[in-house]
Image (tube, grey):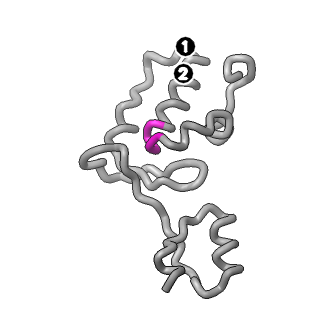
Amino acid sequence: DLKADKLCSFTEFLERLPQIYTAPPPVRILAWCVYVLTKQPQQSNAVDLTPIMIYAFVDQVSTPFQLRELVGGSCAKARAFSWEGDYSNLDDIIDAVKHGHSIDWSDVRR
């Protein structure tokens, strides 16, 4: 129960609401911001959240990475960092996945 506990970090917030991973990165960040602001109502009027929706993001494990470029369309899509290691080495692939890298599985098949 998010109301019963103390303020949680962005990562903790996502862990407690696993269904939110289906939302685009800026929506996940906005949801957490609204959660934080509801815990600090005296400061909520002074916060402008619109910049979150106008910039592009790289969707990565844990915290999305906000870019300086404008989204240029729908915020429903985001880039992802992709690992470019040795696809012939299974241990390297396992290590990359453990560290949150995305694997281009079409390259693995080659």
Query: Which residue lies at the image location 41% right of the left edge and 58% below the top edge?
Result: 79
| Contact flag, marks 2 and 1 (Cβ < 8 Å) | yes
Foreground residue, 69 or 57? 57
Residue 95, compared with residue 69, is above or below; it is below
Q: Position of residue 109 (x, y in %)?
A: 51, 81
Residue 37 shows which numbered tag? 2
> Is residue 34 highlighted in magenta?
no
Q: Which is nearer the eye, 110 or 82? A: 110
Q: In front: 106, or 39?
A: 106
- Tell me the chief SS of the magenta region: helix
Instruction: State which region is magenta.
Output: 23-27
The residue positioned 71% from the left and 22% from the top of the image is 1
Residue 97 in picture, x, y percent from top left: 64, 67
Q: In this view, does 78 lie above or below 35?
A: below
Q: Residue at x 52, y 17 (%)?
A: 43
**Residue 47's x, y, as percent?**
44, 24
Q: Where 98 falls versus 4 (above or below)?
A: below
Q: How crowded is mark 2: few (under 14 residues within 10 Å), some or many (20 or more)?
A: some
Q: What residue type is labelled 1?
A: Pro
In the picture, the disc for residue 41 is 1
Residue 6 on image: x %, y %: 73, 23
Residue 25 within the magenta-colored segment of the rendering: yes
> Between marks 2 and 1, how big is the CA–CA gap?
6 Å
Q: What residue type is labelled 2?
A: Leu
Q: Nearer the viewer, residue 68 or 4?
A: 4
